[in-house]
Image (spheres, coloured by chain):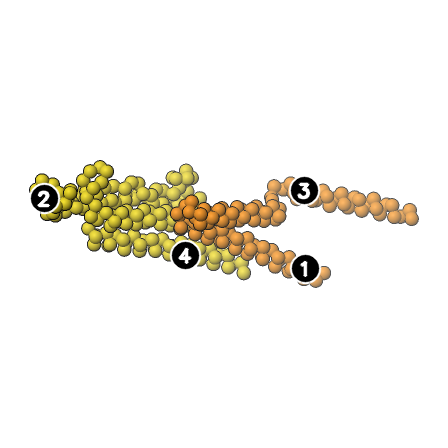
Chain colours: A orange, B yellow
Amino acid sequence: MSGIAPISTQLAHVDGALDGAKTEKVHDGLPTFGEVMGGVVASANERSKFAGDMAEAFAAGARDDIHGTMIALSKADVELRFVGAVRNKVIDAFYELWRMQL
Amino acid sequence: MLGVFSALEVAASGLSAQRVRMNTIASNLANVRTTRTPEGGPYKRLDPVFEAVDIERLRGTPSLSQGVSLVQVQRVVEDNRPGTLVYEPGHPDANAQGYVEYPNVHAVEEMVNMITASRAYEAGITSIESVKQMARSAIEIGR
């Protein structure tokens, strides 16, 4: 009974050390994968929204720039494919780790 | 710095320029027999003047990509060649000698310009397709 308390305090120490490691990682100036992915997805989303607006304006007759509209759509398409490719790559890497024998 | 999509911008400027050219050709052909204009006299053939604009200078960021240029329509000028005189005394715009001055538009010349404009447009489309294909192939690397 008396031995349990010291273990829990030791665990608290370990937790503290882990927390320290975590904050240290966040503060090394590099963005986390989530941040990078979020930025890329936001940019792709922005571009496809812009392309959608352009296509809508074209359909409504507000603009007569066929090639500009199609180029905006192509850019959105390429960017979305890129995000998809990065996502697939990361998921592959994750499963590779998942299957690792310990 | 030039990004992946800069080539698309350059090609798009070319497409816009060729479209302006196509507009002037259509105008010239439509007015091949026009003898009255708000300025007086027959219609004068229109011709666009293109100008190369350095893409980096436009953005104000110097880099290695010097010489890569967008095309801009600087202005549309009137062709000042004399028109063709045709003897038509009954025409309301005939001069004292009975001659009517028709526009300096020559249908054959316009047709040739039209072919070059549409071929140049197609070339621009082809370069856009290639850039797109390159980007897609680059994404394929990860597969």
Q: Chain of mark 4?
A: B
The N terminus of chain B appears in which quarter of the rendering? top left
* Kind of residue sitting beneath label 2: Gly
Mark 1 or 3, closer to the camera: 1
SS type, badge 1: helix
Residue B23 on image: x %, y %: 30, 48
* Kind of residue sitting beneath label 1: Trp
> In this orientation, which residue lies closer to the viewer: A50 or B9?
A50
Q: Chain of mark 1?
A: A
In three-dimensional space, the C-alpha distance between marks 4 and 3, rounded to whole angstroms, equals: 46 Å
The residue pinned by badge 4 equals: B130
* Same subunit: marks 4 and 2: yes
* Kind of residue sitting beneath label 3: Glu
* Residues at circles 3 and 2 in contact by the CB criterion of under 8 Å: no
SS type, badge 3: helix
Q: In the drawing, what numbered circle is on residue B109?
A: none
| Classed neighbour count for the residue bearing mark 3: other residues with Cα under 10 Å, few (<14), some (14–19), many (≥20) | few
* Kind of residue sitting beneath label 4: Ser
In the rendered image, is residue B44 in sight?
no
In three-dimensional space, the C-alpha distance between marks 3 and 2, rounded to whole angstroms, equals: 95 Å
Mark 1 or 2, closer to the camera: 2
Residue B45 on image: x %, y %: 22, 45
Mark 4 or 1, closer to the camera: 4
* Residues at circles 4 and 1 in contact by the CB criterion of under 8 Å: no
> In this orientation, which residue lies closer to the viewer: A31 or B58?
B58
Relative to B115, does residue A61 appear above or below in the rendering? above
In three-dimensional space, the C-alpha distance between marks 1 and 2, rounded to whole angstroms, equals: 95 Å
* Same subunit: marks 4 and 1: no
The residue pinned by badge 2 equals: B98
* Residue at (29% x, 52% y) in the render: B117
* Residue at (46% x, 49% y) in the render: A55
The residue pinned by badge 1 equals: A98
